[in-house]
């Protein structure tokens, strides 16, 4: 079947807020300010993945759009 290991539990609070257990945060190498994405698998399970974001690439793309006058910043 599945080889599963419990890493922790959470209680859902008002407004849908939860605390991600320390072991899960460590496994994801996540810290304050990181974005997490939730993926629904074919089996109906939810996977949590740290969302990786390349700021350097994004800044270069924004600068290119600005040069081409496709992006107006005030």
Image: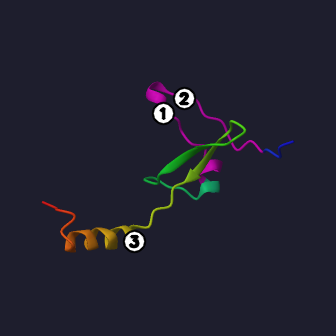
Q: Nearer the viewer, mark 2 or mark 3?
A: 3
List the residue tagged with mark 2.
12
**Dot 1 surroundings within 10 Å: few (below 14), some, or many (20 or more)?**
few
List the residue tagged with mark 1.
17
- Please state the horizontal and vertical placement of residue 1, each as a whole percent of the image: 87, 42
- Please state the horizontal and vertical placement of residue 43, each as a whole percent of the image: 72, 38
Quadrant of the rendered image containing residue 74: bottom left
Q: Which residues are magenta?
A: 5-25
Quadrant of the rendered image containing residue 50: bottom right
The extreme right residue here reads 1
Q: Are marks 2 and 1 in contact (CB under 8 Å)?
A: yes
In front of the other: 28 or 52: 52
Left or right of residue 6, residue 61 in this image: left
**3D distance between C-alphas at marks 2 and 1:** 6 Å
14 to 20, vertically: above or below: above
Residue drawn at (60%, 55%) of the image: 28
Q: Secondary structure at mark 1?
A: loop
Q: Secondary structure at mark 3?
A: helix
Rendered image: mark on residue 57? 3
The extreme top residue here reads 14
- Please state the horizontal and vertical placement of residue 64, each as a whole percent of the image: 27, 73
Q: Mark 2 or mark 1, which has the lower sequence index?
A: 2
Residue drawn at (52%, 35%) of the image: 18
Q: Secondary structure at mark 2?
A: loop
**Dot 2 surroundings within 10 Å: few (below 14), some, or many (20 or more)?**
few
Q: Nearer the viewer, mark 3 or mark 1?
A: 3
**3D distance between C-alphas at marks 2 and 3:** 36 Å
Q: Main secondary structure of the magenta part?
A: loop
68 to 33, vertically: above or below: below
């Amino acid at each position: 079947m599945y080889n599963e290991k419990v890493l922790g539990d959470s209680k859902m609070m008002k407004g849908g807020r939860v605390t991600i257990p320390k072991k899960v945060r460590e496994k994801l190498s996540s810290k304050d300010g990181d974005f997490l994405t939730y993926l629904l698998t074919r089996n109906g399970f939810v996977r949590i993945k740290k969302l990786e974001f390349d700021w350097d690439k994004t800044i270069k793309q924004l600068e290119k759009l600005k040069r081409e006058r496709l992006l107006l910043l005030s």
